[in-house]
Image (cartoon, coloured by chain):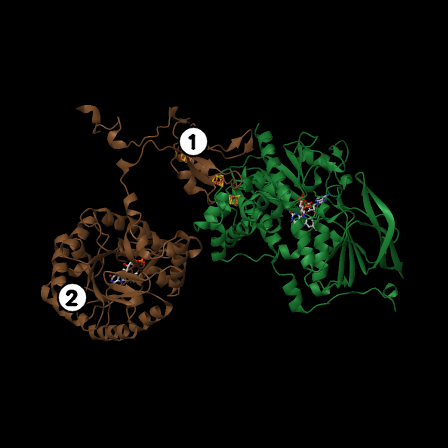
Chain colours: A green, B brown
Amino acid sequence: MTQQNAAPDVAAGRLSDEEYKKNFADLHPLLAPHEAMVEADRCYFCYDAPCTQACPTSIDIPQFIRQISTENPAGAAKTIFAENILGGMCARVCPTETLCEQVCVREEAEGKPVKIGQLQRYATDHFMETHETTPFTRKASTGKRIAVVGAGPAGLSCAHSLAVEGHDVDLFDARSKPGGLNEFGIAAYKSVDNFAAREVEFVLSIGGITLKTGKALGKDLNLADLRTQYDAVFLSIGLGGVNDLGLENEGKSGVLSAVDYISDLRQAEDLSALPVGKRIVVIGGGMTAVDIAVQSKLLGADDVTIAYRRGQGRMNASEYEQHLAQTNGVKIMSWVQPKAIAAENGHISAIELERTAEENGQLKGTGETVTLPADMIFKAVGQTLVSADLNGADSTVQIEKGRIVVDADRKTSLDDVWAGGDCVLGGEDLTVAAVEDGKIAAASIHRALSA
Amino acid sequence: MADLRTNFIGLKSPNPFWLASAPPTDKAYNVIRAFEAGWGGVVWKTLGEDPPVVNVNGPRYGAIHGKDRQLLGLNNIELITDRPLDVNLQEIKQVKRDWPDRAMVVSLMVPCEEQNWINILKKVEDTGADGVELNFGCPHGMSERGMGSAVGQVPEYIEMVTRWCKQHTRMPVIVKLTPNITDIRKPAQAAHAGGADAVSLINTINSIVGVDLDAMAPSPTIDGKGAHGGYCGPAVKPIALNMVAEIARDPTTHGLPISGIGGVTTWRDAAEFMALGAGSVQVCTAAMTYGFKVVQDMIDGLSDWMDRSGYTSVDQFVGKAVPNCSDWQHLNLNYIAKAKIDQDLCIKCGRCHIACEDTSHQAITNLVNGVRHFEVIDEECVGCNLCVNVCPVENCITMEPMAAGSVDPRTKKTVDPNYANWTTHPNNPMAVTEAAE
Ligand SMILES: Cc1cc2nc3c(=O)[nH]c(=O)nc-3n(C[C@H](O)[C@H](O)[C@H](O)COP(=O)(O)OP(=O)(O)OC[C@H]3O[C@@H](n4cnc5c(N)ncnc54)[C@H](O)[C@@H]3O)c2cc1C
Ligand SMILES: Cc1cc2nc3c(=O)[nH]c(=O)nc-3n(C[C@H](O)[C@H](O)[C@H](O)COP(=O)(O)O)c2cc1C
Ligand code: SF4
Ligand code: SF4
Ligand code: SF4
């Protein structure tokens, strides 16, 4: 029997309990106190520190690292939370290699940056371990009410900042659980032990935020009503849709959206119940592509290939992420694009990829093809804004290139509506950028409501 | 390979590295291991009279740590040997017999009566030891009994006891000095006047190494209390170097052999002590931190450095830096230097900028044309060297002397080629003006 005709091999429970546990353990375990001290001692306490400049939330990094080194981790955490209330999650998921750690002067000096992310985690974990609530106290109530739609990082950050200022926030989310992609998207080994949910609880501990889950804008809520019922609205609904490949057989069993599958994985009580293919092809080149590839490998897939249409250097996934994929045994195939999906008996069996080349900046198929047998194909070719949810009668925020247009204050074209996170134009599609958007919008909303 | 053999006041050793009188030299077992590892000599842990002293049974050491818990300073409240005198003497005799090529010095501390010294000197002579060291340095425990630094702080006593010892033994006498005194030259002069063959220094420095903020007591804490102890290790080296230099420069004691002690951890530390006049060095904390093996790189490193520098024997560089030890008022005020940043080495941490900006002379940029850039502003730089010291990159900032005849952009004055110091400076009310008569 040749591989092409083989029955699809999609199965659950490919590994032993021990293997699942080991594979999905913390990617970077918490530093031990001595390790943290040694690492903190490496920081030069730079003036006008480059790392702080590179942090989208401008955390005073030399300050918090110094606080760790003087055995004041709680103070370090306060320094972090003052700029970034989701400093705990950011410490786990930020691509530090392209942010703070990329510009650390130690990177320049010796190619080994201070492990800022891991130190940040050390401080924030310590604080959350030893404190019930955020280090902030709410100011006296202003009586103003704000609707925050979407309880992902952008929404949580905005809601927290507003609550600190004494405003009352209703935080809506379509899902039954808050957290956004922190809860449903981030790779499992980056956020273990239910951290996303614990962090949401921590953020909400400020008080003044009423979480309303199972409330979808466009279904249970509409923007026009929110605008009349609230003093201001913040939209942080992320990107709810996914791009399709546009190929025949895409609807057949075995072709899955990477984000949906990751969401199932993140919510799975028992990883061994999760079916995974033996041979997997991932289409895409971003963080999602890497995450689905690595996680399916960790679930026991035999043969995982990321098929990316340009050169590896152009992948959106950072070099570190690419390296992570490769050290986990994922193959990265560049300069190929999907051309056709073969299916048998309602299940896909292979994918035909066409080699590509760039001519005058234009990507073109060369005609040459290669066929990879596949039990599962994951689509990780980008997410889209479900803009239909936004716009009801006479409340229309301006949309461009499929994203909400905002100004520097994260205000939309509507005077009482702000937006941030993945759903806005010009964003970086990073957790930390979403947090910063929420923070900036909250400050702007506060100014507007105090005027 | 350079010749490291040392002849210090007639005491011969294969290298200048001796173990100082302390726990590493308290027993035959330790000393034999030290000799096996290559140490050139030992000063046996200080002997006293029977009954032996007792030590505390709780912690006797405390420490200051640097990065990665590197031990920088050690504090102790240990006393002299707590083993019976006879046991020590027998062991000394045996070890000296088995290791005839190593220097065997015996440290002594007995009450300030001539007879007590006569008695113990006799016993030490019988062991065949090469010399004695009078411990006038221990700052805790013994001084309360009128010994150790209680003697070392009174030059008259030092002279008296030294004289007794010289009178009653044919062994060379080394006087070990305490640093817990304002002017180290005074006890050295006293030792010299009493006929000492050499001085050794420093013993440990009075210290409280830290405070336990939970127990609210000095650390280390014994049943809720702490006592001051003696400080040693890398942190004390600068203090020891200065004291050695003071004695080497003093006209009365110039040429008096010195055994340098205090923070010697590497061959370089040893070479520095020797350049300031030490004919041998003694080590305690480095051995207590790393074990006896540390001597191997001291030997190898010193000999390699000597080869590189063209020295074939140690006496060629002992004391060589002494003539260049000067005093402030004799430094050349016409020497003008400016800091210079090597832009290729600079990693742009900004420490030089903020140090100079906040605490010195506002002489380093942080932005040039809006770009992060650190450069010295010669118009402001006074050449203080602070930036050099705070820069994390070695040799990135250097102090460049200005050529005579050029104009200092800060003062707008031409750099004078002639030497001129404070004693003749017009601002000095007590300036000696040659033209006066
Ligand atoms: C697989 C994957 C891996 C990633 N890994 C990383 C990483 O390692 N590091 C990193 O920095 N970034 C990573 N990202 C990106 C990061 O997760 C996002 O940039 C970030 O979560 C955006 O935050 P947000 O608040 O804008 O949106 P989301 O996190 O998407 O949250 C949006 C929230 O809005 C809710 N919502 C949506 N529509 C509606 C509606 N109509 N009504 C009410 N509620 C609605 C959703 O349920 C969700 O809770 C990853 C993304 C993916 C997909
Ligand atoms: C635990 C301890 C005990 C010591 N005991 C003695 C002693 O009995 N007699 C003595 O002359 N010096 C004693 N010293 C001082 C050392 O000999 C030496 O002078 C001092 O430690 C400085 O050298 P270092 O920096 O290499 O340790 C002791 C030092 C330590 C740490
Ligand atoms: S750039 Fe690096 S060394 Fe400098 S403050 Fe930031 S973390 Fe510390
Ligand atoms: S030498 Fe002193 S004054 Fe000159 S730049 Fe450096 S710190 Fe500033
Ligand atoms: S301290 Fe040194 S490395 Fe840092 S900016 Fe100044 S010159 Fe550059």
Q: The disc labelled 2 sits on which kind of residue?
A: Arg
Which part of the image, by quadrant, shows the C terminus of chain B?
top left
Q: Is residue B262 left or right of residue B199?
A: right
Q: Nearer the viewer, mark 2 or mark 1?
A: 2
Which part of the image, by quadrant, shows the N terminus of chain B?
bottom left
- Residue corresponding to mark 1: B362
On the image, the x and y values in percent for residue B162 come to 14, 59
**Visible in this render: residue A133?**
yes
On the image, the x and y values in percent for residue B340 come to 46, 36
Instruction: Please tell me the numbered disc located at residue B170.
Output: 2
Q: The disc labelled 1 sits on which kind of residue?
A: Gln
Circle 2 SS class:
loop
On the image, the x and y values in percent for residue B335 come to 35, 33
On the image, the x and y values in percent for residue B138 come to 23, 59
Q: Is residue A80 left or right of residue A312?
A: left
Q: Label 2 vs label 1: CA separation?
A: 63 Å
How many marks can you see?
A: 2
* Residue B383 figure quarter: top left
- Residue B239 vertical position relative to residue B282 in the rendered view, above or below: above
Name the chain under label 1.
Answer: B
